[in-house]
């Protein structure tokens, strides 16, 4: 078994096909032997019996007449079987006072069977004819006297000739069939395993970091579907690898800039370059701002790592309207500062089944974005809609909006729709990623609608609390 397991799939498939073919040829041979022994010979016996009984009906009793002998002789000339008419008492008695060493054509047991009106079947070597035969003995009875017998037989050699021809045909035909089929089976095995070998080689290249490899898809069967799935996997891995590199580059970039500010301003303070107290305070504020930026980045990365792992939500029924109103209170100063009008339409009867802290984080991220990109004097709206069994939360703004390409990329780490203004606004491109992950953990959904120059609308669906 270990040796078989160490073989390649192609070798296993080819050997399996060959083994089944050998078994099939062996079974065919067994069937031929069975047909010979149990069907053909039985058929010969039945034919001899019918022919013998037809001849026996012409016997009318009494002594065997010359006319009956002539009839038997004529039938013998045209029959495939040899027919022997025996009426010699010496041959039929099988008992004393004849010589002990005399061999009668029938035994005493067979004589008793014939006297009872039964037929006797012979199969094998017969000393009388010095050959192997298949024969039938039919009694010719005159009341209770055995006047003679009809011995019909076919030499077993002629039957075995038929079997030998059949065996020769099976052997030659089976060998030819086996050779052709094994050859074809090898081709089939190679055809089926060739794509798998290519996938094995491609998988090794992928394991070495080469995600550009593709497997040719030549069929639409399961192997072809596997090849397509492999290509999709390789493409996804290449994309993920690119995202990983971009992620590391973005993290480095996000940290490098504030670190350079902190380092530069702190060195200026330590070297005594800045003498003015007001200027020193300005530098300290800049250091604090950049430190806060790094702190926010690290916090968001930790949040994202938790949410993408096995982060447990603390689910509890809560009023979504109350949570929205409490969150909005924190933004009142900013709304007033930018003179943004906020329209609020919430249903106080809607109870959401979720983690209120995480949902508040969703609201804050989305409100931060809306405020960041909505110009002074603009409008924002926030409403809830009962779409049982879900609660839909809709947040709209009259900001700069986004292109379709930007909407498709929302949720990519560190992606920002306006990189030139990102530092001014303080975004680092992780907020929407965190929002999407929180909504996903709640079993909800989120989608964006936006048009450049006409603002953005966010639709979030969260599960309602089922009291039943």
Image: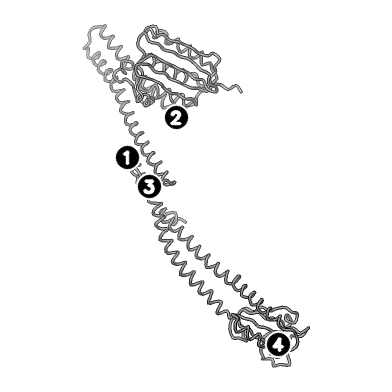
Q: Position of residue 257 (x, y in %)?
A: 28, 21
Q: Earlier in the sequence, mark 2 or mark 4?
A: 4
Q: Does residue 421 appear to the left or right of 56 in the view shown?
A: left
Q: With 199 as the anchor, is 140 left or right in this view?
A: right
Element assignment for label 2 = loop
Residue position for label 3: 218
Residue 451 in the image, given as x and y percentages of width and height: 37, 19
Q: Residues within 10 Å of mark 4 (few under 14, many from 20)?
A: many
Name the mark nearer the viewer: 2 or 4.
4
Q: Which of pointers 3 and 1 indicates the residue nearer the eye?
A: 3
Q: Which residue is mark 2?
A: 309
Residue 230 appears at what percent x and percent y?
39, 42
Lower sequence index among marks 3 and 1: 1
Disc 1 + disc 2, Cβ < 8 Å: no
Q: Give residue 81's position: percent from left, percent from top.
A: 60, 81
The answer to whether residue 35 is above or below residue 102 is above
Q: Residue at x 47, y 66 (%)?
A: 174
Secondary structure state at the residue bearing disc 4? helix
Give the number of the disc on residue 212: 1
Instruction: Residue 372: tell me if it is visible.
Output: no
Tag 1 secondary structure? loop
**Residue at point 42%, 54% (across, down):** 6
Q: Residues within 10 Å of mark 1 (few under 14, many from 20)?
A: few
The quarter of the displayed image where residue 408 is located? top left
Q: Earlier in the sequence, mark 3 or mark 4?
A: 4
> Which one is nearer the viewer's eye here, 187 or 161?
161
């Amino acid at each position: 078994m270990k040796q078989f397991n160490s073989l390649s799939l192609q070798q296993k498939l080819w050997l399996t096909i060959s083994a089944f073919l050998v078994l099939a040829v062996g079974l065919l041979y067994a069937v031929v032997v069975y047909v010979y022994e149990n069907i053909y010979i039985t058929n010969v016996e039945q034919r001899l019996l019918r022919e013998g009984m037809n001849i026996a009906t012409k016997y009318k009793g009494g002594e065997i007449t010359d006319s009956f002998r002539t009839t038997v002789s004529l039938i013998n000339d045209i029959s495939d079987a040899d027919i022997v008419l025996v009426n010699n008492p010496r041959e039929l008695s099988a008992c004393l006072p004849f010589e002990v060493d005399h061999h009668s054509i029938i035994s005493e047991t067979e004589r008793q069977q014939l006297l009872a009106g039964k037929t006797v079947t012979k199969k094998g070597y017969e000393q009388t004819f010095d050959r192997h035969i298949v024969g039938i003995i039919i009694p010719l009875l005159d009341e209770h006297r055995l006047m003679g017998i009809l011995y019909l037989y076919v030499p077993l050699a002629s039957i075995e000739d038929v079997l030998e021809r059949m065996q020769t045909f099976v052997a030659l035909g089976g060998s030819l069939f086996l050779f052709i089929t094994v050859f074809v089976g090898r081709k089939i095995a190679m055809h089926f395993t060739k794509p798998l070998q290519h996938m094995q080689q491609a998988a090794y290249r992928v394991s070495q970091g080469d995600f550009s490899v593709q497997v040719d898809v030549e069929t639409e069967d399961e192997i072809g579907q596997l090849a397509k799935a492999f290509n999709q996997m390789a493409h996804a891995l290449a994309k993920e690898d690119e995202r990983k590199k971009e992620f590391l580059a973005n993290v480095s970039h996000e940290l490098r800039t504030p670190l350079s500010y902190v380092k530069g301003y702190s060195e200026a303070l330590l070297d005594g370059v800045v003498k003015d107290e007001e200027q020193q305070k300005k530098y300290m504020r800049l250091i604090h701002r950049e430190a806060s930026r790094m702190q926010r980045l690290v916090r968001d990365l930790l949040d994202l790592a938790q949410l993408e792992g096995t982060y447990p939500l603390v689910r509890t029924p809560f009023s979504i309207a109350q949570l929205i109103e409490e969150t909005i209170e924190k933004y009142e100063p900013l709304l007033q500062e930018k003179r943004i009008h906020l329209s609020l339409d919430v249903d106080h009867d809607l109870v959401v089944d979720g983690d209120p802290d995480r949902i508040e984080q969703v609201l804050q991220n989305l409100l931060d974005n809306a405020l960041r990109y909505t110009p002074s004097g603009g409008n924002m709206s926030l409403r809830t809609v009962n779409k049982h069994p879900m609660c839909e939360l809709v947040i709209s703004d009259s900001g700069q909006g986004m292109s379709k390409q930007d909407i498709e990329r929302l949720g990519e780490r560190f992606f920002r729709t306006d990189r030139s203004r990102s530092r001014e606004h303080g975004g680092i491109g992780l907020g929407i990623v965190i929002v999407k992950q929180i909504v996903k953990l709640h079993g909800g959904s989120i989608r964006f609608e936006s048009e450049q120059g006409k603002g953005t609308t966010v639709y979030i669906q969260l599960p309602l609390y089922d009291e039943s």
